[in-house]
């Protein structure tokens, strides 16, 4: 089926009744389809693709990340090849998804894996008609392998001793996108943060298929041209699809009366739980994709009350007296002490293909309440056991020690920007920035999809929540953050998670030695390739390995590696790490995975707790590091834990 129109037809796009009609008329098996990531995702169109092309799509799909609703396309068996940066789940915490366990063997499809910025740079090159883009990412990592036709390393033509990495443009046949509203001419409004922005719309050879919350009269768009991100010339066809990004969010900005909506945390939590088993995944797919039959049926199943609960507040959520300076306000109760902060770190439990924060808490934690009014926007705390009475877990020890490391690096080395990925890493950055602010030190916290100067909404632990957008200094996109605020900013400190980390500082978040898939790079490779970094991970011999199974993010610029018992530092690039600080392990509560393991085998003998730094390094790492000359870490204070738990009252990272 042709994806182009004659010159006379380009004045107006086709307007069709619904998403299923849109894809049935304009998509053909075997196409390369790009699923645009503008923070809001084209999920109604994804479900329609799954319904219309199940078992016969043979699509090549490019998209920055495969999670939440995109799993439906995987389960439809409509995808032959996937070009992406992440495959897994992001809520309630980042973790692997069983659908992709055998990705390295080409199951459920073959794949081509990139970092988030290099992926976006390929779209930018395609959008501008360039033969190549230049990237500072990928070098020194295993992500560069197997890309002989797409990635080229050349001597610098300017004469330096550095090599230059060139990457081919990414040019899909069609880009599928969900926007706030559009007029009859096809002009589409979006509200930042915009993720990859308009680049994929310009890169698509045939143009854009779009769903929008509302199609409005042309004069509505004419009155606010600054809101138009996708010009009508690029749009082939469009339709209305209210809540078309669900279960993810959309920022409406009040354009044409569209307020926008929050991420549906209840839906996302249930999705991750049900997809953890094969039977659960099949039942979910039948219930939400096949049985609904259409987007209208999907909305009926959600129900009017649930949709009402997801509506974003019409005004910014109150900041509790805190200025938008990039860090969280102090919690109610005792003030946090100077120097207390938190860290990034998505730590995999022993034997689990997950990063810190990826393991679920014991039992089914209640999802945060949907954002509506100022009061309703804040998620309720768990009621099973007050957080103040819970023991401090290994994960919480990790976050606090990591936060202290971040604070030390900022105050000693003068960093002015923090970029942390999703997981315990962003909790660390939030906590660190807030506590630094109490000491009169300002540092801006960024998130890769376009948030700058985040002042996180207390109680909403999701990194990309629209509530945090209400409390940010700037909302932009991936190139501005991973490019301008990281790669081109000598004052940026990255905070990275690790599925595995080795004695050279290399980080693996891609796959284990037995081939099991973790999650992928996201923006981690871009951060590690261009900025100094702190790596955070709970320690075990399966995580602190002699050599990582896959280098997702190169370790040459890693300054510190933080564990739950101490911090490892080195004097410069290539220098060996040494244990610099020590926090005795007695009194720290177990991780969720350790508690689960204890329930499975209650008769197993208790593991001895290492009593000295040397014993901890020997028992919990495979690193040949020096343990002389360490300094004691002060104990984890009540104030530090109170602050941390005010950010994560549900305990997803406990």
Image (cartoon, rainbow, N blue to C red):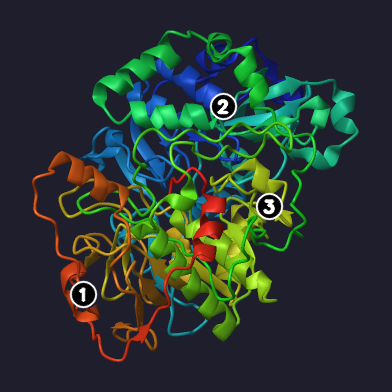
Q: Is residue 638 left or right of residue 578?
A: right
**Could you say where residue 592 lies in the image, as x and y percent from the top left?**
31, 47
Pick the front one: 507 or 616: 616
Q: Earlier in the sequence, mark 1 or mark 2?
A: 2
Q: Which residue is mark 1?
A: 611
**Could you say where residue 610 lies in the image, as x and y percent from the top left?**
19, 71
Mark 2 secondary-structure assignment: loop
- Compared to residue 442, the image places residue 590 above or below, namely above
Q: Earlier in the sequence, mark 3 or mark 1?
A: 3
Q: Residue at x 76, y 27 (%)?
A: 258
Q: Residue at x 63, y 58 (%)?
A: 333
How many C-alpha atoms fall within 10 Å of the one at disc 1: few (<14), some, or many (≥20)?
A: few
Mark 3 secondary-structure assignment: loop
- Compared to residue 1, the image places residue 548 above or below, namely below
Mark 1 secondary-structure assignment: loop
Tell me, for residue 246, which label it has, or none. Answer: 2
Tell me, for residue 476, which label it has, or none. Answer: 3
Q: Nearer the viewer, mark 3 or mark 1?
A: 1
Q: Residue at x 74, y 57 (%)?
A: 473
**Could you say where residue 288 lies in the image, as x and y percent from the top left?**
44, 16
Q: Earlier in the sequence, mark 2 or mark 3?
A: 2
C-beta proximity under 8 Å, tags 3 and 1: no
């Amino acid at each position: 089926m042709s994806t182009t129109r004659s010159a006379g037809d380009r004045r107006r796009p086709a307007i069709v009744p619904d998403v299923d009609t849109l894809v049935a008329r304009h998509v053909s098996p075997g196409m390369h389809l790009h699923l645009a990531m503008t923070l809001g995702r084209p999920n109604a169109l994804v479900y329609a693709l799954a319904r219309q092309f199940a078992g016969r799509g043979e699509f090549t799909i490019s998209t920055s990340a495969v999670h939440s609703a995109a799993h439906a396309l995987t389960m439809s068996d409509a995808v032959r090849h996937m070009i992406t940066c992440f495959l897994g789940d992001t809520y309630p915490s980042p973790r692997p998804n069983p659908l992709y366990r055998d990705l390295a063997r080409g199951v459920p499809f073959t794949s081509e894996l990139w970092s988030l910025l290099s992926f976006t740079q390929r779209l930018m090159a395609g959008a501008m008609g360039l033969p190549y883009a230049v990237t500072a990412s990928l070098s020194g990592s295993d992500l560069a392998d197997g890309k002989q036709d797409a990635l080229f390393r050349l001597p610098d033509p300017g004469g330096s001793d550095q090599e230059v990495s060139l990457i081919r443009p990414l040019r899909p046949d069609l880009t599928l996108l969900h926007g706030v509203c559009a007029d009859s001419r096809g002009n589409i409004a979006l509200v930042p943060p915009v993720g990859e922005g308009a680049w994929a719309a310009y890169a698509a050879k045939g143009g854009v298929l779009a769903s929008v919350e509302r199609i409005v009269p042309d004069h509505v768009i004419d009155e606010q041209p600054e809101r138009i991100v996708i010009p009508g010339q690029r749009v082939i066809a469009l339709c209305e699809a209210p809540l078309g990004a669900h279960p993810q969010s959309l920022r409406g900005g009040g354009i044409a009366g569209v307020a926008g909506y929050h991420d549906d945390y209840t839906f996302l939590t249930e999705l991750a739980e049900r997809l953890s088993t094969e039977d659960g995944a099949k039942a979910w797919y039948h219930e939400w994709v096949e049985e609904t039959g259409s987007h209208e049926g999907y909305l009926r199943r959600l129900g009017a009350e649930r949709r009402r609960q997801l509506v974003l507040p019409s005004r910014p959520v109150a900041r509790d007296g805190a200025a938008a300076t990039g860090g969280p306000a102090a919690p109610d109760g005792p003030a946090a002490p100077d120097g207390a902060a938190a860290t990034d770190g998505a730590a995999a439990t022993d034997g689990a293909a997950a990063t810190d924060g990826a393991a679920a808490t014991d039992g089914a934690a209640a999802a945060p309440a949907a954002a509506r009014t100022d009061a309703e926007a804040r998620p309720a705390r768990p009621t099973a056991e007050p957080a103040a009475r819970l023991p401090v877990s290994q994960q919480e020890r990790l976050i606090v020690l990591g936060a202290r490391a971040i604070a030390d690096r900022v105050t000693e080395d003068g960093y002015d920007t923090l970029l942390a990925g999703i997981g315990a890493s962003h909790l660390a950055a939030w906590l660190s920035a807030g506590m630094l602010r109490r000491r009169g030190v300002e540092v801006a916290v960024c998130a890769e999809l376009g948030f700058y100067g985040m002042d996180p909404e207390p109680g909403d632990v999701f990194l990309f929540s629209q509530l945090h957008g209400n409390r940010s200094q700037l909302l932009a996109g991936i190139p501005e953050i991973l490019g301008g605020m990281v790669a081109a900013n000598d004052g940026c400190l990255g905070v990275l998670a690790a599925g595995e980390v080795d004695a050279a500082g290399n980080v693996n978040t891609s796959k284990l030695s037995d081939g099991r898939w973790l999650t992928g790079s996201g923006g981690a490779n871009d951060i590690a390739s261009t900025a100094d970094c702190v790596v955070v991970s709970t320690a075990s011999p399966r995580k602190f390995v002699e050599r990582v199974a896959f280098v997702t993010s190169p370790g040459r610029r890693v300054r510190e590696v933080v564990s739950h018992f101490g911090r490892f530092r080195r004097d410069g690039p290539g220098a060996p790490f040494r244990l610099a600080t020590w926090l005795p392990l007695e009194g720290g509560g177990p991780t969720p995975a350790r508690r689960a393991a204890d329930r499975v085998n209650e008769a197993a003998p208790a593991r001895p707790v290492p009593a000295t730094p040397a014993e901890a390094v020997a028992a919990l790492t495979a690193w040949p590091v020096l343990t002389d000359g360490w300094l004691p870490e002060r104990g984890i204070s009540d104030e530090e834990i109170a602050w941390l738990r005010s950010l994560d009252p549900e305990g997803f990272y406990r």
